Image (cartoon, grey):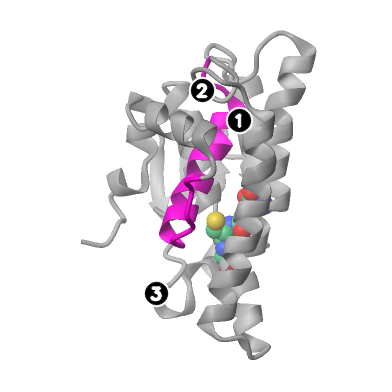
């Protein structure tokens, strides 16, 4: 499988965690979102993903899948041996709620394209930082109240953690103060010791600049 990825992309990082938890080897194809206006906007990559975003996955059979949730669902169904969702239906929905909260209600608001649009409308870096901090804190307030008191988000590692760790990485990159989120910080500390999360971490990626 080929994964079109960027080392610090939140959505790519999610997919890398899911792959690593399932013990799946991939060929990482770096797509630099910054260099020369972004390799994701060049025709070669648009032919793979017409949305011009990472990640995208090319399966061993040659099918291309875009959107991190669709990729993770594909992996979950195709490689069920390390399930990211528990058996219990309400418990599955709890994991999916964290995934949706982060994937739909936090991350899209600080995506590169959205931040550049704010800048294009005349907002300075102070406004942009306040915007990012607002949406991450608002979303994390809900995640903090929603997740459990022990272990990963809901005890055993699962989909909610796959989404939470990349969002935490972004929060730290944007200097968001996280002291108000002790449960979230507990999950972060645990995950950063886990081999799959270490493998998937931006610092462990070959395309990370020196
Ligand atoms: N909903 C998409 C979001 C993908 C996305 O926004 N990726 C970002 C990096 S995390 C990107 O490629 N941004 C490029 C841009 O905004 O120009 C997913 O989950 O895959």
Per the rendering, the mark at residue 160 is 1
Q: Single out the mark in the foreground, 2 or 3.
A: 2
Percent coordinates x, y for residue 49 in the rendering: 62, 57
In this rendering, the answer to whether 14 lies above or below 195 is below
Q: Magenta residues?
A: 156-179
Res. 207 visible in picture = yes
The numbered mark, 3 or 1, whose residue comes first in the sequence reads: 3
Give the left or right position of residue 195, taking residue 21 as reference: left
- Residue 63 horizontal/vertical position (percent): 62, 40
**Local crowd size for mark 3, using a 10 Å CA cut-off: few (<14), some (14–19), many (≥20):** few
Can you say whether 22 is above or below 123 in the image? above
Tell me if the residue at label 2 has its CB under 8 Å from ligand 1. Answer: no
* Residue plotted at (53% across, 47% down): 167
SS for tag 1? helix
Please tell me whether residue 175 belongs to the stretch shown in magenta. Answer: yes
The residue sitting at the top extreme is 87
Quickly name the residue at label 2: 152
Q: Is residue 3 above or below residue 207?
A: above
Give the number of the disc on residue 31.
none
Q: From the viewer's perspective, is the residue at label 3 or at label 1 nearer?
A: 1
User: Pointers 3 and 1 in contact (CB under 8 A)?
Assistant: no
Numbered disc in front, either 1 or 2: 2
Name the residue at 36% across, 48% down: 202
Picture disc at residue 35: 3
Residue at x 67% of width, y 48% of height: 139
The reply to whether callout 1 and callout 2 are in contact (CB within 8 Å) is yes
Q: CA distance from mark 1 to mark 2?
A: 9 Å
Lower sequence index among marks 1 and 2 = 2
Would you say residue 46 is visible in this rendering? no
């Amino acid at each position: 499988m080929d994964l079109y990825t960027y080392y610090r992309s939140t959505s790519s990082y999610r997919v890398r965690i899911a792959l690593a938890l399932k013990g799946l080897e991939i060929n990482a194809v770096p797509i630099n979102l910054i260099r020369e206006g972004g390799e994701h906007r060049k025709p070669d990559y648009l032919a793979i993903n017409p949305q011009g975003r990472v990640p995208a996955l090319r399966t061993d059979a040659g099918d291309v899948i875009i959107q991190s949730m669709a990729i993770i669902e594909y992996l979950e169904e195709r490689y069920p041996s390390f399930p990211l969702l528990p058996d219990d239906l309400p418990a599955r929905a709890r994991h999916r709620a964290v995934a949706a909260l982060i994937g739909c209600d936090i991350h899209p608001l600080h995506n590169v394209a959205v931040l550049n649009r704010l800048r294009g409308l005349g907002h300075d870096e102070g406004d942009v930082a306040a915007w990012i901090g607002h949406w991450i804190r608002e979303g994390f307030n809900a995640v903090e109240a929603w997740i459990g008191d022990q272990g990963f988000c809901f005890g055993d590692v699962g989909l909610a953690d796959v989404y939470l760790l990349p969002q935490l990485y972004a929060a730290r990159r944007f200097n968001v103060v996280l002291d108000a989120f002790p449960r979230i910080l507990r999950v972060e500390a645990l995950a950063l010791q886990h081999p799959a999360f270490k493998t998937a971490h931006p610092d462990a990626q070959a395309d990370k600049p020196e």
